[in-house]
Image (spheres, grey):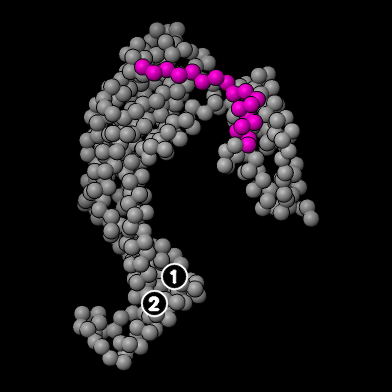
Amino acid sequence: GPTGVGKTEIARRLARLAGSPFIKVEATKFTEVGYVGRDVESIIRDLMEIGVNLVRQEEEAAVRIKAEVSAEERLLDLLLPTKPLESAGIDYIGPESQAADSTREKLRQLWRAGKLDDRLVEVEVSAGGGVQVMGVPGMEGMEMQMQDMFSKVFPKKKKTKKVAVRNAYDILIQSECERLIDMDKVHETARERVQESGIVFLDEIDKICGANSSGKADVSREGVQRDLLPIVEGSTVNTKYGMVRSDHILFIAAGAFHMSKPSDLVPELQGRFPLRVELAALTKEDFYRILTEPQNALTVQYKALLGTEKIEVVYTDEALLEIARFAQKINEETENIGARRLYTIMEKIVSDLSFDAPDMD
């Protein structure tokens, strides 16, 4: 379908509804194996990284409450250091112990009221940095192995850092989440999810059609198509989280096909995308719905933007219909850029108001 009709958005919404790892890649970024450019196997590696981050976020949400409780206790330990006897593991019950407990509770109330936010405490943080391996494009596999080797030779170091209490709390929550989450389980779950329900969206697939008159195989066109064949059909890709099979990963290819047609793709690749759907260009009615129905429609965004300058914007139904009509008309008379045309029109309408807004009373 033409540009701006929602091809990418359909795939992204589908992935969000299914809770699946989703990656959008431009087919033009890749070249045939052996040439400078990205290797098509890096698609699966990037998808695996996205899958790990997705599962990790879910696990963090599950242990968040427990992590917040532990982080609060650790923060109070930093604000009120323990006595020598307690730090040595010896229980001591007496007036001093009871006074310390009372002080701790007072500090807890002050912290929750936000009165200690600016106090400085020392926390242990990762030194960061480490050895970064700058890989050559197309050799992501070697880069991955080198990075893994250096991380074992040079383990991450810790350092103490003085930070405000409000920042220390966030650091401690992150530290507690890392302690509570089993990363081996995260990697295994992510690998299963990527293999069973991962979605790869190959955009601009029409740009790698080998419709050149010279008859020579272009390394960034027909070569890429042939490299995509085993990945789409089902193969095993080596990642730093283990071997990932692409047999059940859903591949969606999309393109405007202005200068070419789907039959220009190599026959083997055509056969691996059995379902073909053509999206029609957007109409005036579609533009009107785009402006009114979504929760974060353009009209709502511009209303919020100008609201920061104490300006209230009200859209009449007639105005929105006129904007939709103009969008369709301009798309028909010039380049058809679909729903992206609405950005241009809305910006043109409010540009003077946006410029003068700070000086208005």
User: Residue at 40% of width from left, 7% of height from top?
Assistant: 215
Q: Are marks 1 and 2 in contact (CB under 8 Å)?
A: yes
User: Residue at 33% of width from left, 46% of height from top?
Assistant: 55
* Numbered disc 1: secondary structure: helix
Give, as a single range, the part of the protein colored magenta.
Answer: 274-292
- 217 relative to 241, above or below: above
User: Residue at 33% of width from left, 79% of height from top?
Assistant: 81
Q: Which residue is mark 1?
A: 165
Q: Nearer the viewer, residue 154 or 335?
A: 335
User: Residue at 35% of width from left, 88% of height from top?
Assistant: 99
Q: Quadrant of residue 294?
A: top right
Give the CA distance from mark 1 to mark 2. Answer: 9 Å
Q: Quadrant of residue 80?
A: bottom left
**For the residue carrying disc 2, how many other residues have a C-alpha within 10 Å: few (<14), some (14-19), or many (20+)?**
some
Q: In the image as oriented, which residue stretches furthest toward the bottom?
A: 95
Which amino acid lies under the numbered mark 2 shown in the image of this protein?
Answer: Leu
**9 sits to left or right of 141:** right
Q: Is residue 276 magenta?
A: yes
* Residue 39 showing in the rendered view: no
* Numbered disc 2: secondary structure: helix
- 215 relative to 74, above or below: above
- 344 relative to 230, above or below: below
**Where is residue 151 drawn, in percent x and y?**
25, 50
Residue 79, disc: 2
**Where is residue 135 drawn, in percent x and y?**
32, 38
Which amino acid lies under the numbered mark 1 shown in the image of this protein?
Answer: Val
